[in-house]
Amino acid sequence: MPGRIRPLLAFVVLLSLLAASAPATANRLIRLEPTGSIGGEGRLEASPELAENTRMSCNVTLLATITSIPKVAGTSFGKLTGLAIDRGGTPTHCFGNPLLGFRGFIPLTSSRTPAPSRELGSGILLYDLSRAEARAWSIVYDSFEGALPEISAINYHLEGVQFFIETELIYRECLYAGSLGDRMTVIRRVVTANEVVLSRSGLALAGGPGSCPIRAIFNMAFSVPRITIALL
């Protein structure tokens, strides 16, 4: 019997050593700090493709909730819960080509359903996205760049983005919907320069009169609080 036990013990010890020396595949979670509610300020811009002279832009405050990220592509790790859009009507707030009579952006909670809003004063409208459809306005993980444990970037996208571009003249209400690809640059496990969202992605026309451009380019950039990452 002792002759049988020794090989078995040696096998168990070998398995233990292999487990201890295994690569960092156990890092199945990217922890973000802080999690929960975050906010950011920036500008939301849109223009029909190849028509920069029709660019439309508004000051925007973004509200979101985020969690740690399971390293599984297609997993949601947060959601936009609100957009405060400054429609104050001056070039420092919301502006566009005067020929279009640009009035602003209207985010939707589902197809053709504007998000409920309330005025905060001075032309600022806060749109509530917290009750949007399940995957609407979701923050979805795609992949990471770099070699573990030092991640250099996190690629993700905003899923179920839906906007009306509202004008008084040519376009009236043009509905654009789709996903916006985004990237966080990470240096020494800190998101650099607090710039989390920087998109220049096209959203296809999903509804509206024939005068609407078939595609609009959205460019969003927001500064948010310091975010650090860790691997679990």
Image (spheres, rainbow, N blue to C red):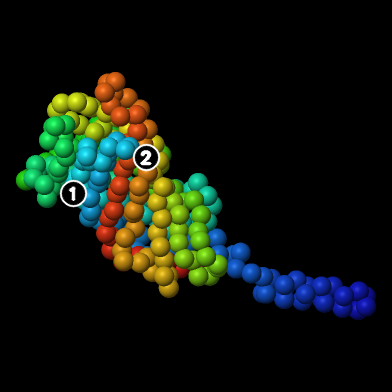
Q: Does dot 2 land on a helix, a strand or a loop?
A: strand
> Taking 151 as reference, is 209 above or below it?
above
Is 188 left or right of 213, judged from the image as shown?
right
Is 97 left or right of 27, judged from the image as shown?
left
Q: CA distance from mark 2 to mark 1?
A: 20 Å
Asked if one can make out residue 77 in the rendered structure from this viewpoint, the answer is: no
Give the residue furthest to the left.
Answer: 122
Q: Residue at x 26, y 41 (%)?
A: 52
Q: Which x, y percent locates residue 216?
A: 32, 36
Under mark 1, the amino acid is: Asn
Q: Which residue is mark 1?
A: 59
Q: Which residue is mark 2?
A: 202
Of marks 2 and 1, which one's residue comes earlier in the chain?
1
- The label shown at residue 122 is none
Q: Which x, y percent locates residue 186?
A: 41, 66
Q: Residue at x 53, y 70 (%)?
A: 149
> For the residue carrying disc 1, how many other residues have a C-alpha within 10 Å: few (<14), some (14-19), or many (20+)?
many
> Which quadrant would residue 95 be assigned to in this image?
top left
> For the residue carrying disc 2, how many other residues have a C-alpha within 10 Å: few (<14), some (14-19), or many (20+)?
many
Under mark 2, the amino acid is: Gly
> Taking 178 as reference, is 198 above or below it?
below
User: Between residues 25 and 171, which one lies in front from this camera angle?
Assistant: 171
Asked if one can make out residue 144 in the rendered structure from this viewpoint, the answer is: yes
Is 154 left or right of 35, judged from the image as shown?
right
| Marker count (numbered) | 2
Q: Which x, y percent locates residue 36?
A: 33, 57
Q: Residue at x 27, y 59 (%)?
A: 223
User: Between residues 104 and 202, which one lies in front from this camera angle?
Assistant: 202
Q: Which x, y percent locates residue 74?
A: 50, 46
